[in-house]
Every structure is written in C-alpha cells, then in structure tokens.
Image: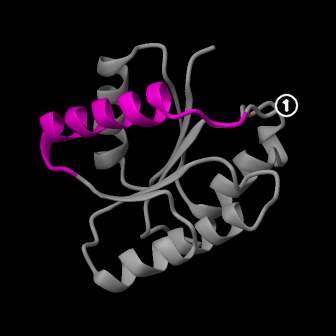
Amino acid sequence: MPAQILLVEDNPGDVQPTREAFHTVDPSIQVYVAADGPAAMAFLRREGGNADAPRPDFILLDLNLPKMQGCEVLAQIKGDVDLRTIPVAILTGSENEADIARAYELHANCYLNKPSGFAGFKSLMESITDFWLNRVKLPQHQG
C-alpha cells in the first residue's frame, strides 16, 4: 500500500514543491493537504466530508497556520489516543528556539526548517521518505 502523508500547510508556495518533491522521490506516495488546523483535525478524525480519509503514515505540520496554530494541532494529535502514534514532523520557517522547545515539549517527532528552492525540497523529501517511510518501523493501525 502506498504511503499516505498529511501536509498541514496554508502556503501554496510550499505545498506545490513539497508535493512535487514527494512525487519525484516516489510517485506512489499519496500527499493530502489541509490548509489550516481545523481542516487537519477534521481529516484526522474523519469528520465532515472526510469520512473516507485515510490514516496518514506521517504528518508534516507547519507552525504558522490560520484558525489554529501548529502547536495547538500538535497538542491535539498527541493528546488523542487514536492519533498519537502517527509521527509528526514540524516543517516550518521558524528557527526560534522557543518554537523548537515548544514543539518537542508537545512530542513532535522532529523539527525541520523549510528549504529554499525545489532542490532543497527534493533533498528533504528524499530524507523523509528514506527514514520515516522506509526504515522506521511503526505500529500497525487497524481502521
């Protein structure tokens, strides 16, 4: 079964290169996008029009989002017994030490800075694919 990734990102200028980079690395990877925190939580909880949404294998989460900040989304994911085992990588432009510390306090699995240019996105998505989708063993989830 192809890997399922949820990208929580409101900036189309970051969504497009992330999607293209994953497609270049492995065309079978399915990337779903939520443009804000409430949309991400609805997707993950299969609410509203998301009844058939897949459970993602991995979540890329921006910190600066409309409606609900990324740390709030992270806290909800890691506080939900049905979602907390999904690895969440913060993917943000912030290099603020307080943001980094807060993300890890909320149990982010890693903190990554957004690259510049397509080559940077491709390199980062190659690393994510290799490590998180190919090497790491994650618990199987039913449902």
Residue 123 place in picture, x, y as percent? 21, 34
Task: Tell me the quarter of the image containing the C terminus.
Answer: top right
- Give the magenta-colored segment's residue range: 115-139
In this picture, residue 62 sits left or right of residue 1: left
Residue 100 place in picture, x, y as percent? 37, 75
Work out whether 29 lies above or below 108: above
* Residue found at x 68% / y 50%: 85
For the residue marked with disc 1, what is the amino acid? Gln
- Quick one: SS at disc 1? loop
* Residue found at x 81% / y 44%: 46
Q: Is residue 62 magenta?
A: no
The image quadrant of residue 72 is bottom right
Work out whether 5 lies above or below 41: above
Work out whether 103 lies above or below 53: below
Work out whether 75 lies above or below 41: below
Residue 4 place in picture, x, y as percent? 58, 29
The image quadrant of residue 38 is bottom right
Foreground residue, 99 or 30? 99
* Residue found at x 79% / y 41%: 49
Task: Please give the residue where the numbered disc 1 appears in the rendered image.
Answer: 142
